[in-house]
Amino acid sequence: MYHLECIECRRKYPETEVIYTCTCGGLLDVVYDYSEINLTKKDLKAPLSVWKYRALLPVSMEPVSLKEGGTPLYRVDRIAKSTGMKEVYVKHEGMNPTGSFKDRGMTVGVTKALELGMKTVACASTGNTSASLAVYGAKAGVPAVVLLPSGKVALGKLAQALMHGAKVLSIRGNFDDALKLVRDLCDREGFYLLNSVNPYRLEGQKTIAFEIADQLGWQAPDRIILPVGNAGNITAIYKGFKELKKLGFIDSVPKMTGIQAEGACPIVKAIKNNAPEISPESKPETVATAIRIGNPVNAIKALNAIRESGGTAETVSDEEIISAQHELASVEGIGVEPASASSIAGLRKLVEMGIIDTDEMVVCVTTGHLLKDSEHVLAVCPKPIEIDATIEAVRKAVFMK
Ligand SMILES: Cc1ncc(COP(=O)(O)O)c(C=O)c1O
Ligand SMILES: [Zn+2]
């Protein structure tokens, strides 16, 4: 009912083959026989979850699941007002089991690893992927190996990877170096690679699109805005919306709008320069460590998603990211990590630039939870006020300007 297909040379591979990229070097897609999928809105009455959309997911065995997906879609009228928009929503992916959207990809990817008979799973990560892989590896009873850029992973993510029992390797290099190494390791040792170059990961992540349309009453928003690092998520969400359109669930596909940090923005540069591919950046740097990536592996797919959907890509500064993180937390009660706040910072900037029309219905995806990166919070928020344990001291401090 489905197979893998190269996006460059169209070569097909059976789903039973352990392969991540085509022999020509091209990225692979999971392609279904859509004429065989008889899915109607009536079949989708169950509560939201990744596995609700099982008819469009490439696994047959019982999934390795911790009840991922089903994340809230909040209407954020105060953010809308402050940006001059009419209708803005936040899809808060930080509400997944490990606190990021990666769980959608991992429940599918780790289940696929078991189906393919793989004995060890591995990934490189800016943090969230490693946390998620550690958890789903634990749930599946399969050892997990994770390679992290030394000193550049938020503490909450590192804590998760360690506590859930992954073998954690801290690489003296950046994420791009770690990804190159883990790909080599998987080839040599027969470990199953669960970075987003693995097309099964993206199949799980496309359920973000399914849920957004579902939550909006089977309607697509005009635009999706999300942070872009290795560029898997923007690709996956676009595929999800395209599949819904193909199956007649929605009439249009949103403009895919990717946001990167000024210090790590190869996709934005390629879009602005109308270049067919990205020029990798060797020294990516940003406070948003989750998207501190200079050579996104899914760049070709992401550029296509942005261009084909009529979307765009824009950079935001670290200051704009932190300010958006504060605003979302304090006026809407939504706590997100810095990378995730870039979608709100990007919305503001693109409205100010006149690129986003104020009448558009926009969904910003916030990819990870605030508590992932509490060190950063302590660095950018005022310190707690330490006082004596007396009512006088408390009253004085409460009313202190
Ligand atoms: C919180 C967060 N946001 C965004 C991203 C970027 O996603 P992608 O690599 O799929 O572009 C990541 C990836 O690690 C992440 O952890
Ligand atoms: Zn090929």
Image: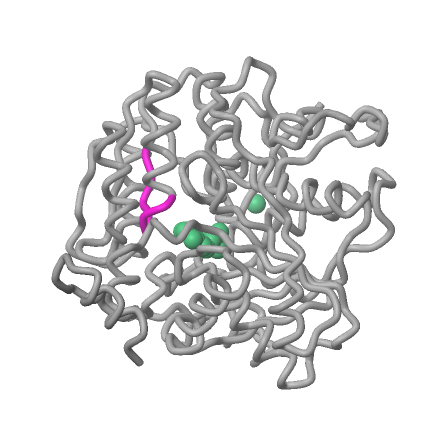
From this viewpoint, which residue is outermost toward the bottom? 353
In this rendering, position of residue 365 left or right of residue 315: right
In percent of width and height, residue 84 lies at 68, 78
In percent of width and height, residue 173 lies at 20, 58
Question: Which region is colored magenta?
Answer: 122-128
Q: Is residue 230 visible?
A: no
Magenta-drawn stretch contains 100: no
Q: Residue at x 62, y 85 (%)?
A: 352
The figure's colour scheme reads one colour
Seen in the picture, residue 381 relative to 151 is either above or below; the reply is below
Q: Foreground residue, 119 or 277?
A: 119
In this rendering, position of residue 219 left or right of residue 351: right
| Quarter of the figure with residue 202 | top right
Magenta-drawn stretch contains 127: yes
Q: Is residue 322 visible?
A: yes
Quadrant showing the C terminus = bottom left
| Quadrant assignment for ligand 2 | top right
